[in-house]
Amino acid sequence: MSNIRYSEIFLSPQGEGYYTGRLTAWIRLFGCNLQCEGFGQKDPTDPSTYILPYKDFDITKANVKTIKDLPVWDYGCDSSYSWSKKYRDLCPNEHFSKVCDRIVGLLTTQYNPYGLFVNDRNTIHLAFTGGEPLLRKNQESIILILDEFYRRDNFPPMVTIETNGTQDLTIELIDTIQKYFQSSEDYHSYYYEEHEEKPGIEWFWSVSPKLWTVSGEKPEKAIKPEVVHHYKLINNRGQLKFVVRNDPRTWDELEEVVQYFKEHTIDWDVYIMPVGATVESQVSPEIREIAEETIRRGYYIAPRVQAYLFGNEIGT
């Protein structure tokens, strides 16, 4: 496989979690094993009540030519265009070298004329998101992109994987991580002690398990701490990020799931992200209630900063 199907490539600050504010080059890979149609619904646990604009949207009538032309929907998965067959033909399918060219093009400015991840101004993250970037075909894409940037001597020293935490790693991706990135033990002493020379400083798992009372995805399909435990064994740098609605059922489910992950040795920081993809949803009265409850429970709050900065726009 030499071609990569993706829905969008863009440059934007990280808007959620530990690296909020860090300038990041994003590639949203196509395909997902979950649909999360309960997001934003009145009762996420009752599919008969769902409103799903992505299914009803008429691409032809709206004269949509690219993913960028699509609206941001209030209901269902906010990136349904990155996995729904309906939008597949809007998503580019390009050779991996062309994909890397596009990323470098985004990085290229008068302050970074060569499009380098490490330049005089900053160090830019590379983030793989989706859909689900750890589908087997997408793991192959990640390897192709990293190998190509290594060949070009423009390797991203910091890489984030935004995953739902349900997909097993391939041997090939494990080998790639170990080849290019510092081990968890090396990370903290990287600048202070001798270490094996590798181009990557950090591989970061941003794991967002989908709660049933928020996403509508059943726990037996969406909650896989044994899988995330394997991620940790490969590299122990990461966070757990949960989308939450201010519902007692959700808070109870959250505590059960967090405990379940702890029992599998996942002791990463827990971030709480209020449900909602639009800027309107991120300034609703419920946001303060979720923030206050998050503080009370001792977790970190992760509002969608990109919504405040750029409004209701794809590619931010």
Image: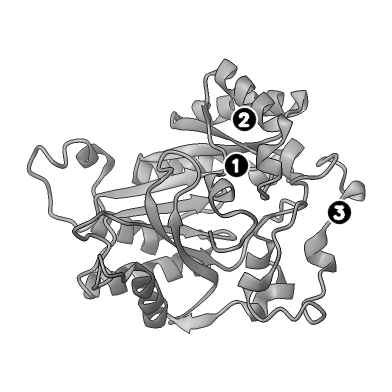
Q: Quadrant of residue 56?
A: bottom right
* Residue occupying the point 16% across, 36% down: 189
Badge 2 local density, few (<14 within 10 Å), some, or many (20+)? many
Residue marked by disc 2: 257
Report whether 24 appears left or right of 209: left
Disc 2/disc 1 C-alpha distance (Å)? 9 Å
Q: Position of residue 136 (x, y in %)?
A: 51, 65
**In the structure shown, which secondary structural element does the residue marked by tag 2 occupy?**
helix
Q: Is residue 275 visible?
A: no
| Along the viewing direction, whichever of 256 and 88 lies nearer the viewer | 88
**In the structure shown, which secondary structural element does the residue marked by tag 1 occupy?**
loop
**Residues marked 1 and 3 touching at CB (< 8 Å):** no
Relative to 214, say whether 156 is above or below.
below
Disc 1/disc 3 C-alpha distance (Å)? 22 Å
Q: Is residue 297 visible?
A: yes
* Residue occupying the point 62% across, 40% down: 223
| Along the viewing direction, whichever of 273 and 219 lies nearer the viewer | 273
Q: Mark 1: which amino acid?
A: Pro
Front label number (3 vs 2)? 3
Q: Tell me which label, 2 or 1, sits earlier in the chain.
A: 1
**Residues marked 3 and 2 touching at CB (< 8 Å):** no
Residue marked by disc 1: 209
Report whether 296 appears left or right of 55: left
Q: Tell me which label, 3 or 2, sits earlier in the chain.
A: 3
Q: Position of residue 248 (x, y in %)?
A: 76, 23
* Residue occupying the point 43% across, 43% down: 20
| Along the viewing direction, whichever of 282 and 27 lies nearer the viewer | 282
Count of labels shown? 3
Residue marked by disc 3: 51
**Residues marked 2 and 1 touching at CB (< 8 Å):** yes
